[in-house]
Structures are given as structure tokens and as C-alpha cells.
Image (cartoon, rainbow, N blue to C red):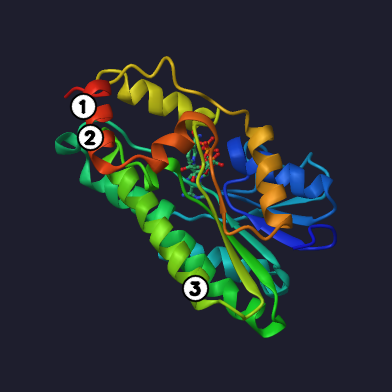
Amino acid sequence: MKIEGSTALVTGSNRGIGRAIAQALGERGAEVLGGVREVDARHSVGGVANVRPVRLDLSSPDSVEESVRELGTDASRIDLLVNNAGVFTGGLFDRTDVTKAYELLQVNLAAPIHLTRLLLPSMLERGSGKIVNNASIIGHVPFPGAVVYAASKMGLHGFTESLRRELEATGVTVLELITPGVDTDMMDQVQSELDEHANTDGWDHVDPVDWAEKVLAAIESDDDELNPGGGERLAKLLPKALLDLGTKRAFSR
Ligand SMILES: NC(=O)c1ccc[n+]([C@@H]2O[C@H](COP(=O)([O-])OP(=O)(O)OC[C@H]3O[C@@H](n4cnc5c(N)ncnc54)[C@H](OP(=O)(O)O)[C@@H]3O)[C@@H](O)[C@H]2O)c1
């Protein structure tokens, strides 16, 4: 897909990976709608070239509908939807707050499905477009201590793969980001919430700007997945028995 001249919508572009992707797309000549929870002084990517902050609150089905309605005719011009926004909750599952679990599933899984359902028909009418879903290595290597998060990312993986096959030959393509550890606020949260159960000191962290560059390259080459490198790529290839052994060593209740 050609990025220059395209119209992109990136959810969760206020910080972290979303901000880096929005910025990189803008620098490459896309017109970027930078999805933020609220367009105000705190939540803004307004200073970034070619990025216009738009409200995209994924907290509930109603807020997703309202946010897309507020986009007006811009919604039907979107060529590239990057479902990036996400939240994390870690620790032992038997202590998980069920309300938080529902909130996580809403933002990480239901909202990308909902947003795709709203924006895909215009892409299909034009016979072109791309959906990019920011999943995670945990969607392929479901380690313990983040059970609900793993469920959301495995769900997003299933949605992405099934949709990709369904859209074959329509001109609309799908890309799954199998994102590794990236140095963002979420990674800080992961490390502090898993601290009691695992030693996360040696974990690799990729810089968000470097990961965004890889994402753009995968968009341009119409790849259907972007794999992590290093140890995470190897973990993805391991058989279940070896993964069980690895997590037994690395994790304790
Ligand atoms: N960092 C990693 O190591 C890693 C690894 C694998 C996958 N991922 C995935 O990559 C994506 C981005 O993560 P990140 O590391 O960049 O996280 P981050 O720095 O914590 O940023 C998360 C973004 O999501 C937005 N968001 C959260 N809840 C929202 C809601 N209800 N409505 C709209 N926006 C909402 C946040 O908005 P506010 O700023 O307003 O809170 C923020 O912009 C997530 O899907 C995450 O699961 C990250």
C-alpha cells in the first residue's frame, strides 16, 4: 500500500506505539487522524506534522459509535485503520477485578472489531484499504500473569486471521502486528505488575520509533504479519512442551 497521500486513522495515538506510528505515517506523507480519548491540551498529538487529533474513545460501544459519527465524512475516506489502542492488567487471575477484565476486553478486542465493522464498508466500496491490528507476542506465546490480556490478544489474532481470509481478493488487506516488548508506559506497567511473579529485568525492549518504522515497512510491502525479532521470535516457534518448561522456570505464583 502506498502511504503517501493516504488517509490513516490510528487509535491510541496520544502516546507510546500509537504516537510513533501516527508520527511516522505523517512524516511519510499520509493525512493522519490521530485518535485520542479526548481532544484537549493533555491528550493531543497536535504538534506532530500531518496529524490531526480526533476524539476516538473506545471505552464503550456507545463511545465508539459517537466517535465515528463525529468524524463525519472523514470516516468514509479512511484508507488505513490502525487498531492500536490497548490497556494491560497483570497479576494472578484469581485476584483479577472482573470490571477491569470487561474494560480490557472492550478496549483491546471489542473496540477494534466494532471500529473495523464501521469503517470497512467504505473501503470495500472503493476496492482498497488496509486494517492493521496491534496484537502481541502474548497472542502467540500466552505466558502466565496476564491471563485476560492474553485472551484479548489471542482473540484479536483470531479476528485478524479470519478477516484476512474473508477479504481475499477484495482489495482490502489485513496486517497483524505481533508486537514484542516495546519501551512504553505499558511496558513499565507490565514489569511492575509481574514483578512479584517473574524476573522481568532481562526482557528486551524495542524503541517505539524503531518498531513504528518496521510497521510502516510491513504496510508498504503488504505483509500479512509483522513478527518480532530475537528471543520473542524464537519463543513463537517453540512447541507447547518447551514453552511450558520455560514458563515453569520463569514464573511463580
Ligand atoms: N508496549 C509493549 O511492550 C506492547 C507489546 C505488545 C503489544 N502492545 C500493544 O500495543 C498497543 C499500544 O501499546 P503501548 O505500549 O503504546 O501502550 P501505552 O503507552 O500505554 O498507550 C496506550 C494508548 O492506548 C490509549 N487508550 C487506552 N484506553 C483507551 C480508550 N478507552 N479509548 C481510547 N484510547 C485508549 C491510551 O490513551 P491515553 O493516553 O488517553 O491513556 C494510549 O494512547 C496496545 O494495544 C498494546 O497492547 C504493546
Q: Amino acid at mark 3?
A: Arg
First along the sequence among labels 3 and 1: 3
Depth check: give the residue in front, 207 or 88: 207
Q: 56 above or below 85? A: below
State the SS at label 3.
Answer: helix
- The residue lying furthest to the bottom in this view is 125
Q: Nearer the viewer, residue 56 or 230?
A: 230
Of the numbered discs in the image, which one, if any, rests on residue 165?
A: 3
Task: Determine if the C-beta at disc 2 is less than 8 A from ligand 1.
Answer: no
Whether residue 65 appears in this view of the structure is no
- Between 82 and 37, the residue placed more toward the observer is 82
Q: Secondary structure at mark 1?
A: helix
Q: Secondary structure at mark 2?
A: helix
Asked whether, in this view, residue 165 is left or right of residue 171, the answer is: left
- Find out if the beta carbon at label 3 lies less than 8 Å from the nearest ligand 1 atom: no
The tag earlier along the polypeptide, 3 or 2, is 3
Q: Which residue is mark 2?
A: 244
CA gap, disc 3 and disc 1: 35 Å
